[in-house]
């Protein structure tokens, strides 16, 4: 197995499978592929046994679980069946950041024709052009409805007149309501429900650059609107860091009215780009009356970047955000203070799509009293993990440590609870109001 991650990683890249895999059109595995799959299964099982931070695996009989799932891999005729068996075995652990990533996700890294869930073939004739097609839209499920929460100017959604607050009824004929009902049933008690709902309803809004996407929406006046979009390149900087599938990181910063600095970014990856931009922003905000850091819809990334960012607003040495516990050692998330730090009020915006390192960052600043948190509870998926390539060329993401915030809280399956809890509403979005941002601005103005 090729080890690809070299840093503690807390990143939500695990694939989403809500229903059984369709196999009637997928190629039958060769004997060679079957052997590689069985070898990969053994690697996955042994890695969990040997590297999980809890040697007792919370009381699971891991040997018995191996005997339960190994025959399914042996008998599998197609790749989706193999992945389904491995994922279900990993799900028995009941933790985030375990996953099997199809080999096709690595095409943009390796230039190879990997397999995908549709073809089930390790030598598929994929004709993908660029997997980072973008509509300029974000979706959240509010009160059981898929609602457009962001429409980015200059991108296809805005160009076609889509507005925040509109309900997304279907994408390419795939009805949002059916997806939502299925997720709500399967993840009813999970802190990750918002994250899974968003991923499930919005996944077809992404694809290859140049793909055509057909949307059916309900506008603010209750009228059904049909819109055809052509996806364009996703804005931001691309990164291949740590052997993950290629991802796009973007950061925006500006001064708001009222002398308030604002920074928003979608992930803690691409350190050279992200930390340079974050540093430039904080330097320009030193005389600001307050700073807002928006990590809503943030997929996480390299844990160490949270310490570097916190150093722009925490001047005391030996301050830490929390502790990472491995099987035989621990690592402190110690803040690295800058020569000049910002000492004004800091607001951090989060939601159910703030995952992993985003939770470590927000929860740590909250625990040490350096930031006030606004929004809704985060995803509760903050376990450090590593991604490796298996003998069959699939990726394997696995947990190797636990994380406890400085306040003594386990973020996994709990998340960060905001100091000021505010849920978005369709009504506010239709009025083009960001009520979470408004609450943060109002707080800064009184401090």
Image (spheres, helix red, strand yellow):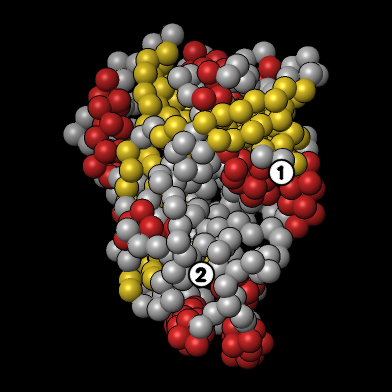
Give me the disc on residue 338.
Answer: none
Helix, strand or loop for disc 2 = loop
Relative side of 27 to 124, left or right: right
Please name the residue that numbered disc 2 is placed on: 121
Vertical side of 424 occupied by 368: above or below = below
Residue 65, given in percent of the width and then of the height, sits at 63, 85
Relative side of 161 to 147, left or right: left
Q: Residue at x 55, y 35 (%)?
A: 212
Q: Residue at x 30, y 63 (%)?
A: 6
Mark 1, residues whose alpha carbon is within 10 Å: few (<14), some, or many (≥20)? some
329 vs 21, nearest the viewer: 21
Residue 118, given in percent of the width and then of the height, sits at 58, 61
Is residue 42 visible to us here? no
In space, the residues marked 1 and 2 are separated at their CA atoms by 25 Å
63 vs 328, nearest the viewer: 63
Give me the disc on residue 174.
Answer: 1
Residue 159, given in percent of the width and then of the height, sits at 53, 18
Q: Residue at x 54, y 20 (%)?
A: 158
Residue 125, given in percent of the width and then of the height, sits at 45, 61
Vertical side of 257 occupied by 127: above or below = below
Q: Residue at x 78, y 38 (%)?
A: 144
Mark 2, residues whose alpha carbon is within 10 Å: few (<14), some, or many (≥20)? many
**Eye-nearest disc, 1 or 2:** 2
> Do callouts 1 and 2 mark residues in contact (Cβ within 8 Å)?
no
Q: Which badge, 1 or 2, is on the more N-terminal residue?
A: 2
Residue 410 lies in what quarter of the image? bottom right
Vertical side of 28 occupied by 150: above or below = above
């Amino acid at each position: 197995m090729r080890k690809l991650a070299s840093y503690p990683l807390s990143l939500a890249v695990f694939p989403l499978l809500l229903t059984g895999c369709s196999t009637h059109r997928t190629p039958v595995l060769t004997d060679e592929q079957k052997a590689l799959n069985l070898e990969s299964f053994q690697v996955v099982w042994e890695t969990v046994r040997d590297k999980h931070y809890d040697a007792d695996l919370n009381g699971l009989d891991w040997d018995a679980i191996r005997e339960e799932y190994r025959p399914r891999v042996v008998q599998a005729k197609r790749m989706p069946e193999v992945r389904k068996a491995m994922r279900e075995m990993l799900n028995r652990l009941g933790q985030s950041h375990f996953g099997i990533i199809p080999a096709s996700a690595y095409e943009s890294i390796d230039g190879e024709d990997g397999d995908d869930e549709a073809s089930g073939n390790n030598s598929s004739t994929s004709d993908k052009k660029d997997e980072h097609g973008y509509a300029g839209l974000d979706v959240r499920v509010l009160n059981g409805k898929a609602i457009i929460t962001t429409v980015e100017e200059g991108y296809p959604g805005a160009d076609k007149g889509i507005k925040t607050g509109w309900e997304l009824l279907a994408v390419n004929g795939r009805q949002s309501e059916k997806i939502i009902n299925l997720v709500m049933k399967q993840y009813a008690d999970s802190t990750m429900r918002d994250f899974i709902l968003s991923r499930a309803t919005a996944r077809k809004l992404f694809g290859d650059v140049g793909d055509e996407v057909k949307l059916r929406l309900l506008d603010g006046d209750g009228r059904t609107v049909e819109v055809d979009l052509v996806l364009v390149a996703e804005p931001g900087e691309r990164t291949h860091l740590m052997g993950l599938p290629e991802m796009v990181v973007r950061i925006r910063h500006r001064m708001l009215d009222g002398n308030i600095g604002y920074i928003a970014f979608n992930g803690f990856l691409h350190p050279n780009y992200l930390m340079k931009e974050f540093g430039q922003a904080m330097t320009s905000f030193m005389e600001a009356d307050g700073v807002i850091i928006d990590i809503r819809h943030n997929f996480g990334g390299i844990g160490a970047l949270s310490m570097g960012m916190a150093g722009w607003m925490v001047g005391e040495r030996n301050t830490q955000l929390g502790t990472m516990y491995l099987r035989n050692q621990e690592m402190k998330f110690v803040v690295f203070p800058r020569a000049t730090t910002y000492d004004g009020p800091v607001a951090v915006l989060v939601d159910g799509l703030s995952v992993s390192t985003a939770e470590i960052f927000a929860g740590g600043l909250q625990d040490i009293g350096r930031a006030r948190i606004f929004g809704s509870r985060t995803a509760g998926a903050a376990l450090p993990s590593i991604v490796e390539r298996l003998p069959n060329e699939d990726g394997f993401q696995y947990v190797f440590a636990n994380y406890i915030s400085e306040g003594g809280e386990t973020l996994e399956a709990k998340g960060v609870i905001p100091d000021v809890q505010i849920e978005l509403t369709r009504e506010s979005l239709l009025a083009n109001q960001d009520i979470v941002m408004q609450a943060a601005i109002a707080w800064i103005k009184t401090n």
